[in-house]
Image: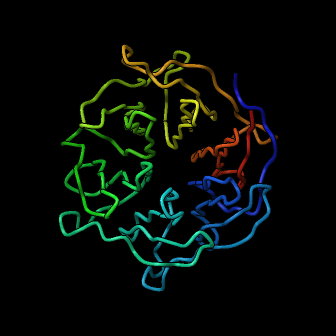
Amino acid sequence: TLPAYSFSMYGVTSGMGVAVNAAGDRVYVTQTGGDLTVKIFDGKGNAIGTAKPPDSAGAQHVPLYVAVNPVNQDVYVSDRATGAIYVYSPDGIYRRTFDPGTDLAGWQPVGICFAPDGSMYVTDLGSPFHRVHRFGPDGKLVSSIGSQGMFNFPNGVALDASGNLYVTDSNNGRLRVFAPDGRELGGIPRGAREGELGLPRGIAIDDSGRIYVVDTTASAVLVYKVAGPNDRQPTYIGRFGGQGTGDGMFAYPNGVAVDTHGHVLVTDLAINRLQQWSY
């Protein structure tokens, strides 16, 4: 089955990334337009706060993606323009800037996700080539995946219940799946056939093992089932959305998040709104 459209949250300017806490009562949306802050909503779509960058971010900051640390509920916001990840309290109070260590000086963080123990995965568009990094619960760099030409603007990252890592390799038009040890297991290719991808951006995985991939060029969210132990790629279930400006349609979808109550949240850069879909 696929989720059905529920309602839209407005008051977002060029919303790109979205995250929701475990309880489903705090929704965070990054704005790449307007005042370039992170808007905070409750689970019913009421605006309840704003997360602002530190003064040190200057005038060039642009918040991109956002994720909630499941251990302490801190909110992490990537900013490629300033080469930083800003950390906030659940209510949007700035706490600190994440330190990636000297080995990643000059990095350009984009997508973020967390493991249950607080380990963090980040896509990086900095030199010498695009990579995905894993940081331990203590914030120290553990490992990286990537080599020259391997990724082309990786965006979203997500983990399944087995610890496998899913990366939307956006400009290569594909979804890639990696084992916990970094081996590539399979994925979804670029193509025009049903279930194949065009420009994948945001990704999320729910408690039932359903994978949600935002395909910007298709103006839709494609849904897959996590691959079994003998499968090399996820199983395609279907899609929802479609090109348009009405309820349940998208113009330029980008970010996606899921909570534990069967809700799927999708940003739309062009229409300045966040849509909630529900099972």
Q: Nearer the viewer, residue 162 or 191?
A: 162
The quarter of the rendered structure image containing the C terminus is top right
Q: Position of residue 259 (x, y in %)?
A: 64, 46
Relative height, residue 95 to residue 262 (above, below): below
Name the residue located 42 percent from the left edge and 39 percent from the top edge: 170
Please say whether residue 160 is visible from this viewpoint: yes
Q: Is residue 88 left or right of residue 151?
A: right
The answer to which quarter of the image holds residue 182 is top left
User: Which residue appears at 59% of the width and 69% of the height?
Assistant: 90
Q: Quadrant of the N terminus?
A: top right
Question: Residue 177's quadrant in the figure?
Answer: top left
Q: Position of residue 142 (x, y in %)?
A: 23, 54
| Badge count | 0
* Left or right: where 72 falls relative to 121: right
> Could you say which is closer to the camera, residue 149 or residue 5?
5
Q: Is residue 215 visible?
A: no
Locate residue 5: give its quadrant: top right
Q: How is the image coloured?
A: rainbow
In the image, residue 253 lies at what x, y percent? 62, 43
- Residue sitting at x 37%, y 31%: 176
Q: Give the vertical position of 145 relative to 221 (above or below).
A: below
Note whether 129 is above or below 200 in the view shown. below
Q: Residue furthest bottom?
A: 55
Q: Is residue 174 above or below residue 257?
A: above
Q: Nearer the viewer, residue 186 or 43?
A: 43
Whether residue 133 sits left or right of residue 39 in the image: it is left
